[in-house]
Image (cartoon, rainbow, N blue to C red):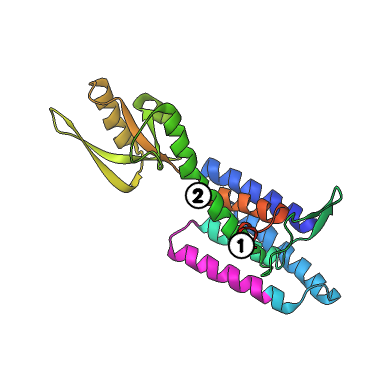
Amino acid sequence: MLRLLIGSCMLVYGSYSDVRTREVPDVVWLVMTVSGIIFAGVELFMGRLVLFQVFKSLLVGGISALLFYILNFGGADIKAIISISILFPNFPSLSAFHRYLPMMGVPPLDIFVLSTLTNSLLIALLAPISLFFYNLLRRDFSPLMFLGYRVEIPALRRRRHFKLMHEIEDKGSEIEKRYIWGGIEPTEEVLGLLGDLERAKKIKEVWVTPELPFIVYLTAGFFTAALYGDFISTLLF
């Protein structure tokens, strides 16, 4: 229960901080790591935890963090993976309201950080599906409807955490739009250019793609793994 309480509080706060400021204080990962070391030490001494289980969790967490580093994920995501692997060397097994958690039982591998990661990746797949239905309801039919949505130019300055999907160039008599993989940062210069084009009535809307930090999905994966179980194991077995 203490592990779950500490992990939940730290990850929720880390997600909130990342969404608001794009930064997560290192104290979040320090609290999770130190708590995990203390809990593991006590349980190893009491014989309730085997050393191989700790090694297995740290190995998977380390490899996953390395892959995230190679794929250029944020530092907070990498630190979160390592912290979770230390805080939870095995699956939490709890009982509440006459039910045992996780609801689907502990998966065969019993590597909590792995289940957290796979659950979060599956949850992240809901984002393009949600965008598709959002655009479908608005009748914005486009090959981009899985990746973003239309926004009126005056509303751009009121939005946060997004990227423009097109590079827009004024050709005089017409506007040229060129899709840019990875998006374009909405700098003051870019927004100023779009504002000028909108006032000249050359363009009214642009396509944008939302940028939700992966730690939000990781936190969702953490809760689903602890309360429900491993999505992939459930599908397989």
Q: Which mark is residue 125?
A: 2
- Image: magenta residue range: 55-74
Relative image position of residue 215 (x, y in whole percent): 56, 51
Q: Quadrant of the N terminus?
A: bottom right
Query: Magenta span has 165?
Result: no
| Residue tagged 1 | 236
Nearest to the observer: residue 194 or residue 89: 89
Instruction: Say if 7 sits above or below 108 in the image.
Output: above
Hey, which residue is sitting farthest left in the picture? 173
- Residue at 26% x, 26% y: name it: 203
Q: What kind of residue is marked 1?
A: Leu
Could you tell whether 29 is left or right of 148 in the image?
A: right
Q: Look at the numbered disc 2 and give the secondary structure of its residue.
A: loop
Q: Look at the numbered disc 1 and give the secondary structure of its residue.
A: helix
Relative image position of residue 174 (x, y in whole percent): 16, 29
Nearest to the observer: residue 148 or residue 1: 148
